[in-house]
Amino acid sequence: MKFTAAFTGIFALLLIACGCKKNDKPPTNNNSTPDLKMVASGLVSPVALAAPADNSKRLFVVDQVGKIWVVQADGSMPSTPFMDLSSKIVSLNPGYDERGLLGLAFHPDFKTNGKFYVFYTAPPHSGGPESGSSWNNLTRISEFKVITDGSQADMSSERVILEEDHPQANHNGGTIEFGPDGFLYISIGDGGNKDDIGPGHVSDWYTVNAGGNGQDIYANLLGNILRIDINNGATYTIPADNPFVGTAARPEIYAYGFRNPYRFSFDMGGNHSLIAGDAGQSLYEEIDNVTKGGNYGWNVKEGSHCFSTDADHTERSSCPSMDTANKPLIDPVIELVNAANPKGGGVAITIVGGNVYRGDSLPNLQGRYIFGSFSQDGQPNAKVYSAQMAASGTWPHEELKLKSYPDNLGQYLKSVGQDQAGDIYLLTSGQQGPSGATGKVFKMIAMH
């Protein structure tokens, strides 16, 4: 979740597509028009959705305030949550917050082992990143198991997998997902504040700009997408082919150079690409096609443009195209103009990464990447977009018109999710922050 300095009072979030392999489906009907069907309501701030590969056809909805709810195959939703972690998370600001319960992933063998994983922000450790400053929260990835009948989480089963001190309240990332390789991938933002500067933001190789967790791969795990093996060891082990194994860098890191990669997903078909939405600062929003060891530029660049920590509403005239390890700074495959960009033409406050559509009912969208904006301008008027994936270069994209929502969603878009059948879900709320009960989950369907 991110937010521009101009919109720090705006909830800039703030899932998971399944990590299973799924064959591409040929088009069967080219006359379908997308629309939305509400499948859940009365939530506070729905920020992630996951569906286990257990043939139950259940949907698990993550509410930022610390609860996970189940939508059963028949559409019903039990009155008791599957899990309640509200006592374990930091206290949230109801008007705006990027912390809380943010991510959920089911073990590939969940049907037999009952294991699942959550990403939440716990109360901070004592101390701080430097004298006179305190940690704001603690990023925690934990494993839990379900009770015998699988209907609820066993709250006594928590096994902490990974923790990372977080200096500010924002830019927490929040996605966890198993890749097609069986490893667990985790996105963590650059630590918060703005511009990747302030206490807890270390110096990096690009001295022209202050700060640098996004470009640092040695001091901490912030500003990265991580990849770990949770099936071995007391907590986790490092996959042998992680890009920085055998170097002085943190071996958990899979890719780096991110500001706030709030939502990423794996394509269920095709090449099973890892696609991440990275929230920008004040000028540009981006979607990245993430590859192992890739450097995605922040804070040397914002999107495909040179970034300045001296004046973050003004682009630098030039910047390096590679880091000091000769890693190219990889440009996004999709770029949106931020509403705060003084050049004008802004269409988004924050980008919300999505999923590649692999369902059956909308053949016109088959193989297209569906994503959105949290808001266009700070109001509850999010838009949804569709992009044609390409082997190289940028991905052509366009606004996706929905039959019952021709102009915008009329709410804030907080996440995009996917079920085992490849269908897409939009998670929305009428509130910027974690308050009220206007949160809804919509399924993208065909209307003829």
Image (cartoon, helix red, strand yellow):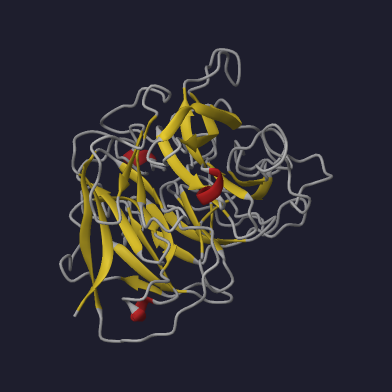
Q: Residue at x 48, y 60 (%)?
A: 287
Q: Nearer the viewer, residue 293 or 236?
A: 236
Residue at the extreme front of the image, as rendered: 148
Numbered disc total: 0
Q: Residue at x 37, y 56 (%)?
A: 416
Judged left or right of residue 318, residue 83 is: left
Judged left or right of residue 273, residue 46 is: left
Q: Which of 265 and 76 is in front in this view?
A: 76
- Picture quadrant where residue 364 is located: bottom left
* Vertical relation: 419 (above or below) 202: below
Judged left or right of residue 344, residue 103 is: right
* Vertical relation: 22 (above or below) 436: below
Could one spot residue 175 in this view of the protein? Answer: no
Could one spot residue 80 in this view of the protein? Answer: yes
* Vertical relation: 289 (above or below) 198: below
In the rendered image, the quadrant that contains the C terminus is: bottom left
Residue 34: % across, % down:
25, 73
* Vertical relation: 83 (above or below) 359: above
Residue 29: % across, % down:
31, 86
Residue 405: % across, % down:
17, 65
Residue at the extreme right of the image, as rendered: 246
Q: Which of 222 and 160 is in front in this view?
A: 160
Residue 1: % across, % down:
41, 43
